[in-house]
Image (cartoon, rainbow, N blue to C red):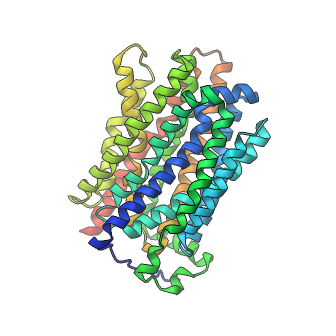
Amino acid sequence: MPRQEIQVRNPSSTQTGHARIVLIFLTLLNILNFADRFLMQGFAIDMIHDLHLSNLEFTLLTGFVFTTFYTVMGLCMGALADRVHRPRLIAIGIFSWSALTAATGLATNFAQLGLARMFTGVGEATLTPAALGLLGDRFNSQQRGFAAGFYYLGAPIGIGAAFIIAGTLGAAIGWRHCFFSLGAIGVILTGLLFLLREPRHEQGMPGDVAQRPVSAVFAEVWQALRASPALCLLILGGVLVIFAQGAFVLDQLWLVEERHLNRQYAQRLAGAMFVAGGVLGALLGGYLADLLQTRRAGGRLWFLAYIYMIGVPIGYVYRLLDTTGMAFYICMFIGSMMITIGYGPLFASLQDLVPAQLRSTMTGFMILCMTLFGTSLGNVAVGWLTDVFWAAAYSTPITRAVMLGMTPWLLAIPCFMMAARMMERKTT
C-alpha cells in the first residue's frame, strides 16, 4: 500500500497567538497528568507502609501495572487521534483518569490499587499522542523542538508538584485526600477542552485521510519504520534513555534510607529540584536543539548525543556523593535537567521524520516503546535488584541497583549519533 503523505500548511503569523494559547493550555494539562502519575512516588513511604507493599509490588504499581495499559492504549488512542476530533478525545481521557485518580485514594490493598492504576493509565493515554499531534499542526518545523520541550514542562513541574504536595499538603490531610483533590481538579478542567478547535478542519485535511481505517494507519506506521532506519534508531535511543530514568523510581527511599535525609525534607527537596532543574532542562533542550537543527541536518539528535555524554557521568558521580557537600545538590540539579532535556528534541525529531497524518499514531507508538520497554522494565529491574541486594546484606542496595539501571543511558548515545548521520546523508 503506497504511503499517502499529506502536507499540512504551516501556521501563519495571525495564528501564532492562538497556537501559544493552545500550547500553554495543553502544558497545564500535562502538568496535571504527571502530578497524578507521580503522586504515588511522592507518597512511596506512606503507601508502602499503609498498604503493606514490598519494594517489588510498589515498583510494579508505578511501572508495569500502569505502563502496560498506558502504552498499549496510547498506540490505539494515537491512531484514533489521527482520525477524530482530538480536543474532545482528550476531554474524555482527562475525565476518566481524574475520576480514577480520586478512586486511588480509596484503595486498601495491592489488588485495588492495581486496578485503579491500570485504568488511570488508559485515561492518560489519550493526552500526549493527541496533544503533540495538535502542536505539530500548530507550529512549523523550526519551532517544534521548543513547542515539544515547553509541553514537556509538564514533567518537571508535575513531578515536582507531586513531591511538594506529598511533603506539605500530605502532612496536613493525608495521602488519600491528596488523590481526591487532584482528581477533582481534573474533572473541572475537562469542560475547557470543548472550547479548543481542531486544526485539521482549518487546514483542509482530506476526508479520506482523516477517516481511513485503523488497519491502514497501522500499515502506514510499519511502512514508515521500514523506510527510515533513523526513525528506528531514534525510538531505540529513547527507550534506552527512559529505561535508565525508570531506575529512579525508588529515589525517595534512597534519599531517606541510604542518604539519611528527613522524609519530609527529602520530599520537598526532590520536588524543588524536579521543578527548577526540570523546567530549565526542558526549555534549554528544546531551544538549543532547534538552534543546532538550523545549522546542520540531524542537529537535534547531535544535541542529544552531546548533552548525554556530559550529563550521564555526572549522574553516576551524584550517587556516590555525601549529602553534606554542595556538590551533591549541584549534581542533583543537573540530574533533574537531564531527565527532561531530551523530551523536546526526541519528539520534535519524530514529528519531522513522519508524515503529518501519522503524527499522533507514531507518537503513541514511540510512547508505547519508551514506556513499556523503558520505564516499565526500568522500574521492575531496579525494584528486583534492590530486593536482591538487600537480601544479600549490601549496605547500599538501592545505590547499586540504580547505578546498574543507568547503564543503558550510555548506549543511547551511539543510537542518536548514527541516526543523525543518516539524516545528514539524506540531505546531501
Most extreme residue toward the left is: 295
Residue at (47%, 68%) from the top-left corner? Answer: 359
In-image side of 137 versus 243 (left or right):
left
Locate residue 25, reporting x and y percent.
45, 57
Q: Nearest the camera: 226 or 92?
A: 92
Residue at (26%, 61%) from the top-left corner? Answer: 297
Residue at (56%, 20%) from the top-left corner? Answer: 263
Quarter location, residue 257:
top right
Locate residue 109, reporting x and y percent.
79, 35
In-image side of 411 versus 306 (left or right):
right
Residue 401 can be seen, yes or no: no
In-image side of 177 versus 333 (left or right):
right
Locate residue 202, reporting x and y percent.
42, 79
Quarter location, residue 213:
bottom right
For the C terminus, the image quarter is bottom left
Residue 421 position (above or below residue 51): below
Q: Nearest the camera: 152 or 372?
A: 152
Tell how many labels: 0
